[in-house]
Amino acid sequence: MIATTGLNSLHIDCIVGVYAFERERTQPIIINIELDYDFAAAAASDAIGDAVDYDLIARGVTELLHERKFVLLEAMAEETAALLFEQHALAQTVRLEIRKPEAVPAAECSFVRLERNRV
């Protein structure tokens, strides 16, 4: 019973960007995260130990972005996907969209989107 769990619009203030002024202060990043996994055990047991814990997702991704101080959203997305696979052995597929609202003043946001499958 493959299904999806995740977080919409996780807001994290972090250092990210190419330009010197972006390396000096935090700016908002908004992340949508989806993980596909087999819900059968969680549905049967009703126990968090059999599920993907979205609180752990939020804490892990927030910690990564605070510590790593990425230059590119592409690198941020790849390392975030790797972290999610590492922390959530049940996850078979990870989908991410990372938005940077302050990147281009004339646009609502810049973004990267990726989908990775466990190998």
Image: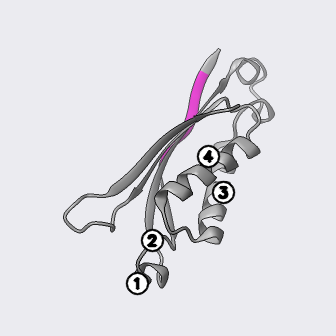
| Residue drawn at x 65%, y 14% as measured from the top left | 1
- Sequence order check, earlier mark of 3 and 2: 2
| Residue drawn at x 54%, y 52% as measured from the top left | 77
Of badges 3 and 2, the one in the foreground is 2
Q: Is residue 49 magenta?
A: no
Q: Is residue 108 left or right of residue 20?
A: left
| Residue drawn at x 42%, y 50% as measured from the top left | 112
Picture coordinates of residue 64 (x, y %)?
65, 62
Give the answer, above or below, for where 71 lies relative to 97. Answer: below
Residue ID for mark 4: 81
Q: Is residue 27 left or right of residue 33?
A: left
**Gap between marks 3 and 1, in whole Å?**
27 Å
Q: Which residues are magenta?
A: 3-8
Quarter of the view holding residue 6: top right
Q: Nearer the viewer, residue 113 or 2?
A: 113
- Judging from the image, what secondary structure is the residue with disc 2 in? loop
- Sequence order check, earlier mark of 4 and 2: 2
Residue ID for mark 3: 59
10 Å crowding of disc 2: few (<14), some (14-19), many (20+): some
Residue ID for mark 1: 21
**Gap between marks 4 and 2, in whole Å?**
19 Å
Identify the amino acid type marked 4.
Answer: Ala
Q: Nearer the viewer, residue 102 or 6?
A: 102
